[in-house]
Every structure is written in C-alpha cells, then in structure tokens.
C-alpha cells in the first residue's frame, strides 16, 4: 500500500514512563492485527484513563498489569504506548493464556497487536467518539499494511468468557460490532482516496415530507458534512434522485435538493 492517508484527527502522544509495569519498552517486530476494546468504565475519558495508567505505571500489582496503546473519546485520541507516533511497542491488553489470537493470527495479541480503547458513556458524545475510533482503526490499518476487513478483532472475540468489549461500549453509542467493522472498512477506502463513485442522477422533481430529524448533506453519504438539520414535518423539494448514494439500511436512494445538497430517502415520506 502506498500513498497517503487523510489525517482527519490529531493523535496526541502522552507516553507512560518506560520501563515500567505498564510499558516494558519492548518493540513489536511486526504489527499483525488490531484489537478493539472499550474501557468498561462508562464516563471515563481518554485523558483520565491515560493519567491513571501513568500514575500507576510503577505501582500496579504485577498480576493486574494492563495497558493499551490508544484511548479515544469525543475530544481526543491519546497514545500512551507508541504505535503511530513512535516505533510500536508491546502493550498488555489481552490475557496471555487466551489462545484465540494465536489461532486467528499466529501470534499473541500482546506481542503482535495494537490495542485501541473506546471511551463511552457519561458526558462523552457518542457520535464524535465513534467517528474518531473508526478513523484511528483505519489509520492503524494503513500504517501497518493490515486488511481492515480481516485484521481487526474485538476483545470479546478473543476472550468471550471474561470480556464483552467493545460490544458493550458501542451499544451505548447505538452501534454494533459488525457496524464498526463495516465503518472502518469504508473509512479506510475513503481515506486512501478510493472515494465513492460519482453520484448517478435521475432527473425528477417533486416534494416530500421529512419524517425524522433529517440531515441535509453536501454529498449523498453519511460521512459528508451536514449543511442543515430538518425537523420532521418539513416539506422539501427535490430536483433529482441519486441511485448510488451510500446505502443506509440497504437503501442507497438519496434525493438532491435545488441547492445541490442531499438527503437520504429513508428519512422522508
Ligand atoms: Zn478489552
């Protein structure tokens, strides 16, 4: 893979001191996959979690030592063990005795995977945190030449007896794990410049009534900028139908309005 990746967000390096119990400063020779986690602690922020790791890096009981590379909330992406902002090092984010990682990827997660923690709940804006989480997973795939459709795994999948993350955290953001994997793949394609095809327009006109809070966007995609939010009951005129917009609930039909903005057909009647 070559080329560039669209840098939509900043990654803040705020490293745990090393060597310490949470950061052994051992290089990862080859990053083979990614593990998606959530913090399991609703309302705790990226900065708060990293601060806790830094403060306890020498004193945590060896048996309870845990760490991860990145924490993501609605405001920040913070890297506390180098992955993207420095040569990747090992973190301790999956129990060593769990063997599903070895079966799937031929290596233990702590030796060959980057762990990314999703922060959720409390006052964390779920949509904004999710957007950053999706992006940073895609960014990691690009950095380490991973396949976003195969090389990301949820912690619950590796350790189902003990863990439900990131399913639990994502649910608080009204998203599923399957949706996350799809969104990372879409983000990856978009960010490496494989943009969606040009809209195919069928010229038609008429008017429809908004049935939910509806986003008017700059392109027929949920990733495009929102120009305006229309309340239910708004009557809106359209000038064209877009047949190949981003599918939402398997419906790829979007409308174009007279100002050249777009809205999804599922939000009107
Ligand atoms: Zn986890």
Image (spheres, helix red, strand yellow):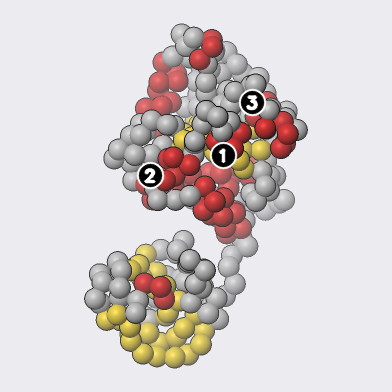
On residue 154, which mark appears? Answer: 1
- Name above or below for residue 221 compared with residue 131: below
- Name above or below for residue 112 compared with residue 236: above
Q: Earlier in the sequence, mark 1 or mark 3?
A: 3
- Name above or below for residue 266 compared with residue 61: below
* Residue that label 3 marks: 98
Q: How many numbered discs, if any?
A: 3
In-image side of 219 versus 206 (left or right): right
Local secondary structure at mark 1: strand
Residue at the farthest front position = 161
Q: Earlier in the sequence, mark 3 or mark 2?
A: 3
Task: Report the residue at 46% width, 8% height from top.
Answer: 59
On residue 172, which mark appears? Answer: 2
Q: How many neighbours does mark 2 have within 10 angstroms: few (below 14), some (14-19), or many (20 or more)?
A: some
Residue at the farthest right position = 106
Q: How many neighbours does mark 1 have within 10 angstroms: few (below 14), some (14-19), or many (20 or more)?
A: many
Question: Quick one: 221 or 103, which is closer to the camera?
Answer: 103
Gap in angstroms between the C-alphas marked 1 and 3: 13 Å
């Amino acid at each position: 893979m070559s080329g560039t990746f669209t840098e939509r967000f900043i990654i803040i390096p705020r490293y745990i001191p090393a060597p310490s119990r949470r950061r052994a400063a051992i290089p990862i020779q080859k990053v083979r996959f990614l593990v998606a986690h959530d913090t399991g602690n609703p309302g705790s922020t990226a900065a708060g979690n990293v601060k806790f790791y830094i403060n306890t890096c020498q004193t945590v009981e060896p048996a309870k030592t845990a760490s991860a590379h990145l924490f993501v909330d609605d405001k920040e992406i913070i890297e506390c063990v180098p992955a993207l902002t420095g040569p990747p090092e090992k973190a301790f984010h999956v129990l060593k005795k769990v063997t599903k990682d070895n079966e799937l990827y031929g290596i233990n997660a702590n030796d060959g995977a980057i762990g990314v923690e999703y922060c959720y709940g409390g006052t964390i804006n779920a949509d904004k945190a999710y957007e950053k989480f999706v992006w940073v997973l895609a960014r990691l795939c690009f950095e380490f030449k991973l396949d976003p459709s195969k090389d990301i795994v949820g912690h619950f999948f590796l350790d189902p007896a003990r863990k439900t993350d990131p399913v639990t955290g994502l649910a608080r953001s009204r998203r599923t794990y399957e949706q996350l994997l799809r969104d990372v793949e879409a983000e990856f394609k978009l960010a490496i410049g494989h943009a969606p095809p040009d809209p195919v327009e069928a010229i038609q006109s008429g008017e429809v009534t908004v049935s939910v809070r509806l986003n008017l966007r700059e392109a027929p995609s949920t990733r495009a900028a929102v120009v305006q939010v229309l309340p239910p009951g708004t009557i809106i005129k359209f000038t064209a139908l877009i047949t190949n917009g981003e599918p939402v609930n398997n419906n790829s039909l979007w409308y174009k309005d007279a100002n050249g903005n777009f809205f999804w057909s599922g939000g009107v009647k």
